[in-house]
Image (cartoon, coloured by chain):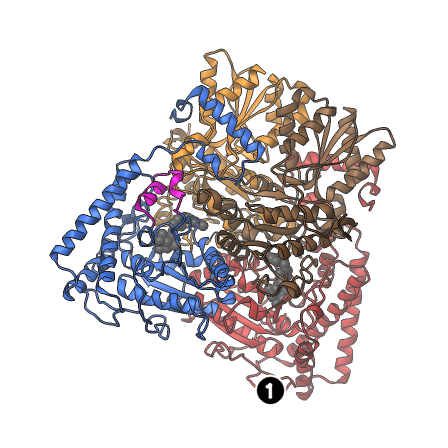
Chain colours: A blue, B red, C brown, D orange
Amino acid sequence: MYEEVGPTVSVFDRAYDDPVRVLDEDGEVVGDVPDLDAEALVEMYRHMRLARHFDGRAVSLQRQGRMGTYPPLSGQEGAQIGSAAALDEDDWMVPSYREHGAALVRGLPLKQTLLYWMGHEAGNATPEDVNVFPVAVPIASQVPHATGAAWASKLRGENDAFLCYFGDGATSEGDFHEGVNFAGVFDTPTVFFCNNNQWAISVPRERQTRSATLAQKAEAYGIDGVQVDGMDPLAVYSVTRAAVEKARDPETDRPRPTLIEAIQYRFGAHTTADDPTVYRDEDEVDRWKAKDPIPRLESYLRSEGVLDDERVAEIETDVETRVADAIEAAESEARPKPEEMFEHAYAELPPELERQYEEFAAFREAHGDEAFLEE
Amino acid sequence: MYEEVGPTVSVFDRAYDDPVRVLDEDGEVVGDVPDLDAEALVEMYRHMRLARHFDGRAVSLQRQGRMGTYPPLSGQEGAQIGSAAALDEDDWMVPSYREHGAALVRGLPLKQTLLYWMGHEAGNATPEDVNVFPVAVPIASQVPHATGAAWASKLRGENDAFLCYFGDGATSEGDFHEGVNFAGVFDTPTVFFCNNNQWAISVPRERQTRSATLAQKAEAYGIDGVQVDGMDPLAVYSVTRAAVEKARDPETDRPRPTLIEAIQYRFGAHTTADDPTVYRDEDEVDRWKAKDPIPRLESYLRSEGVLDDERVAEIETDVETRVADAIEAAESEARPKPEEMFEHAYAELPPELERQYEEFAAFREAHGDEAFLEE
Amino acid sequence: MSETQNLTVVQAVRDGLYTEMREDDEVLVLGQDVGKNGGVFRATEGLFDEFGGDRVVDTPLAESGIVGAAVGMAAMGLRPVPEIQFSGFMYPGFDQIVSHMARFRTRSRGRFSLPMTLRAPYGGGIRAPEHHSESKEAFYAHEAGLKVVIPSTPYDAKGLLAASIRDPDPVIFLEPKLIYRAFRDEVPEEPYTVPIGEAATRREGGDVAVFTYGAMTRPTLEAAESLAEVGIECEVVDLRTVSPLDREAIIEAFEATGRAVVVHEAPKTGGLAGEITAIIQEEALLYQEAPVKRVTGFDVPYPLYALEDYYLPTAARIEEGIKEAVEF
Amino acid sequence: MSETQNLTVVQAVRDGLYTEMREDDEVLVLGQDVGKNGGVFRATEGLFDEFGGDRVVDTPLAESGIVGAAVGMAAMGLRPVPEIQFSGFMYPGFDQIVSHMARFRTRSRGRFSLPMTLRAPYGGGIRAPEHHSESKEAFYAHEAGLKVVIPSTPYDAKGLLAASIRDPDPVIFLEPKLIYRAFRDEVPEEPYTVPIGEAATRREGGDVAVFTYGAMTRPTLEAAESLAEVGIECEVVDLRTVSPLDREAIIEAFEATGRAVVVHEAPKTGGLAGEITAIIQEEALLYQEAPVKRVTGFDVPYPLYALEDYYLPTAARIEEGIKEAVEF
Ligand SMILES: Cc1ncc(C[n+]2csc(CCOP(=O)(O)OP(=O)(O)O)c2C)c(N)n1
Ligand SMILES: Cc1ncc(C[n+]2csc(CCOP(=O)(O)OP(=O)(O)O)c2C)c(N)n1
Ligand SMILES: [Mg+2]
Ligand SMILES: [Mg+2]
């Protein structure tokens, strides 16, 4: 986790279409650099590299038939790592299905992420000390959870923030509307973080909604809405940190919840089952690749003297090792045991389910795994 | 139907919290009077009186056990009649469950409305030439229908507007969000008319959402949003007419759909099953009764010399007769026949349903109606 | 002996909420009109005054939001009791119910359990408007991870509600509104539970087993009394929980006579009567003397109220069904 | 003789859409990624180019909006064919499906019929992520006013889809994605229909009737072939429509042997196997020689894909079930 830093500039008093920026595409400073120490910045860089490298390897694993469908995040590291870094230890993250980068900042082992996408039940077992909700596949369905969980925390007088991720497409779902509206009404400490990566599979952002920005949807809920350059990790950090602090502070006259629209792009396919060349131009992809968050931060850190070739090389090696280790660990995980299917449907197996389990186990005992895996 | 009138002043370029007004609470002119001829104005007045009188009688019928639960509209006549009057013959209305007043402007016989709330299947049978959708009880569920129907009309190159009613509470539902968002994206000729009567049963407007106005929710969809004094029938007419014309006109650079927030109050209970004294003050009710749309319009029409005692008396008599006749007609309607239950589930009864029907009919034949109505 | 009160079903529900909220600070109620208004059926009457607006919460009008927020609360360890105003309005929250409420335990391998109880007034018979008379318990019984409870007496209403609220897993608690105020029962003032998953024999009889639940229990008992006069003795079993079903009780009652009738107000096709029939014949075919007769609502949308008496099973229809099973 | 093409199931679906759209201007397709992308399974491939963006419409990501807008369109007389990307994502649109799509005809006493067909890829077996492998056809079969169709061959896919689109009433059309590309069939190029509500006998045999549908038809036939080697001859009936069920075909096939097995991938409790069992025993108890055996998915949330082969009925499990029914 990153160290806590001093008060952040208020970023909420601006036009919805005026994104917060700190670094330009070349890594030049164009805004207020957040007050993070050098190690925190290097950590951010390391996490981005780690996410990027992990992503590439995961895509290969899928291609090699070593993993199932996988949703890549490449291009979105700035938004993921910058925002997750803005949380404190006890805060919570409520992800969709693409936030492997954010999750690793929160302490979710890469191995877990791999197991999940490898279809192991164990992939669902987020460790008790990792404040991350389960992956949510039905679009926007996690939004009301983030509101409810934050509400619970507020009711208990705890002081935690809940960072909820979702995509541009998710803003069209009823659950987005209901969840954010509840947050406004009950003033819950929730930060709604929209990863606007321009596409919902093949459906472009303009087809989702006629509103000029997604940030302005905050108007409908009487909460703050703000755009940020989602490929600028420092800008993302600043905005998210401000939102997190506001979420926790009932003393300000601002609403606790915030809607952040982080403008970004996914470089790759929607998932490994998707072929983006069918619906979008290479040109577009190239334009966005010029905004790649990683070289941007690297260039800034080098110019600040925080990174040099040596340190970058160390990070490269570290990152490769960690990913290789995680893959090794995930792949040496024993195949899930069929009984795991029955284990967590209820705290205690109801009698009929127990019967089903016993019939199943007896059949497997008698006929072996070939009776299931025949095809 | 009212006669078509000339172009209406654009009403969309104003602050969300600046409601369009034409008459003040005393019926004095404070805005642009729409260009309606005297007979149209009298017709509007007559319809409001008719709706009010109908409403009172319906509530009594329920109290006397002659009708089931009924949702009164008293206080909301200005919004209902003013808006429905702004439609042309071929336009459509997509109601919730409280728009008995708007429906009668559209030509739905009062008898039908009575039959529906008396629980007769026949109450569902809106005549073919009445462009009114079925009553929609699940809150906001009619919103996507209005979008889809308008979209169909647009795809066919027809030039009809679709006026969709719903309450303040409805704006919290996912279906409101999804339906209005689709309308923005596909630029459908839909007018979304929110009857903000301050309460969703016992839940006050402020508890629905933190946004300062409901009109501003239009921002989320990139469409026009406007507030109107919903107890000022002329203001409602003007705004709705402008929205209807815009809906039909693809030539303007404005989006076709509009969200109208009509500020109003229900004088009575949510339904006859509700006791509003439990959750709201008499004071509040009195304050809103001072805005009663009927005396307001009457006073204006008298001052314009369009109404006098004689005409008002004629209207009173007419209204009483029409309601009495409708009640008489509804109450002399034969009790619905049990087989009606089976008639419209499908265009053609599937075999199992036919079997069920036959078993049912044979049983009834053998045992008589006492076997069903015993309790 | 403990104090009792003479309560209706809805009063017993209210009392159950009150008692559990008093016992456990983590219990809270949320929904439409549950606060000052005390619920449209008065099931939460007085709770707002007693426990305040943080524990008796009027929400915006949004069922998916209500269920979804309760999921989030329950994941954090609270015991939310969301109310959906009528069971016909659970559908806008259906995705939250089946995709999350039912599966959060599985989806986190037990890290997050959801000790939440979703209450809804349910069923027909009160001359209510469209969509207010649904009985679609079969939807929820088909979704693994949920329990589905339907009480038929004030005593059970309080005790089953307490058991549901204390259950570590999510429960759908459907309250038959036809009997909300139909009769009274002695209900202990103190907290108690009635176990989920156990049927209750409401009447003993050696000629035929009749399975039912909720509001249909009363006309079923009425039919049984009337048949007793002609010498047919029915064993009437009130299932009380429709998921998980009390298989043992079903099979035992059936085997005693080899004849059975299932009564519910839900539509026939795909209703629980089919499931119960299947259980019977997979466990006790050799005892079977007659087809299991299903006396149910019809496979049509619930009619407007003028016809609802023709839709709902009545004592007379149940009697006829029982006779068919007995005389086969 | 008419021209045929050798098509997979998904190609036949696409061809069915194409053919019906060419025949009738009022037919249009809407959903997520159905346009330029041609659908995530390519079921709408090329339709956007052929018919344009007004008839092949990419919508915002909102299932209730998709179904609800289609309801409005259909009420105005169009024949919309909304696609929900996976059947597990029909739940956010569930209220529109059950409260409106199923009931608009009743709720307008026949004034508005809804000639709409809601398509969704359905079922498990393709190593898909969570929520992508649902088979909850029982939900829709329990809702009066809907028809529910599940094809198992390319020929049927095209013909049943055409029948669904032309039907005056709303149809839920579930496409077993496990067999989307599993095999090919000769499919006529010209338009044709396969009637809704009629089962098809896929194999004749005099020892036991096995009822199934969708993707389970193949392992069922496989089990039947394997059992033939040991002298057990199965009559395999592919129901094709699960609402309304082809009662006559079910009873006829059952009566021939007095033994039956029902196979589906949906969870057991509350699944259609229970309904079919109930039909059998209410119509043909006297023929019954053995309990109807249900070979189904388990009553647990569908597992992550590494275990799905243990969840779905396999030929071996089906074989065992059939043996049980035969040897009883
Ligand atoms: C309720 C629901 N509908 C449809 C889908 C299928 N689906 C998976 S991802 C996706 C697009 C999501 O787009 P967006 O919200 O922009 O997030 P992104 O994938 O771009 O991060 C769709 C339609 C789903 N998972 N859930
Ligand atoms: C989906 C759904 N949830 C709950 C209800 C129960 N209910 C009926 S009217 C109502 C309040 C509606 O308030 P509003 O939208 O403001 O309309 P109003 O009645 O004030 O005209 C509620 C909660 C319903 N009919 N549908
Ligand atoms: Mg996106
Ligand atoms: Mg209201």
Point out residue D41 in the picture as x, y percentages from the top left corner.
Answer: 37, 41
Which quadrant is the N terminus of chain D positioned in?
Answer: top left
Q: Magenta stretch?
A: A108-127
Q: Secondary structure at mark 1?
A: loop
Which residue is found at the position 49% from the left and 69% from the top? B258
Which quadrant is the C terminus of chain D positioned in?
Answer: top right
Which residue ends up furthest to the left in the rendered image? Answer: A309
Quadrant location of ligand 2?
A: bottom right
> In the picture shown, does residue D227 fall above or below C294?
above
Q: Name the residue nearer the viewer: A347 or B36.
A: A347
| Amino acid at the residue labelled 1 | Val
Q: Decide whether the magenta segment is chiefly helix, strand or loop.
A: helix
Point out residue A259 in the picture as x, y percentages from the top left corner.
Answer: 40, 65
Q: Is residue B99 visible?
A: no
Residue A109 among those drawn in magenta: yes
State which quadrant residue D294 falls in: top right
For label 1, the residue is B29
Q: Name the residue nearer the viewer: D43 or D227.
A: D227
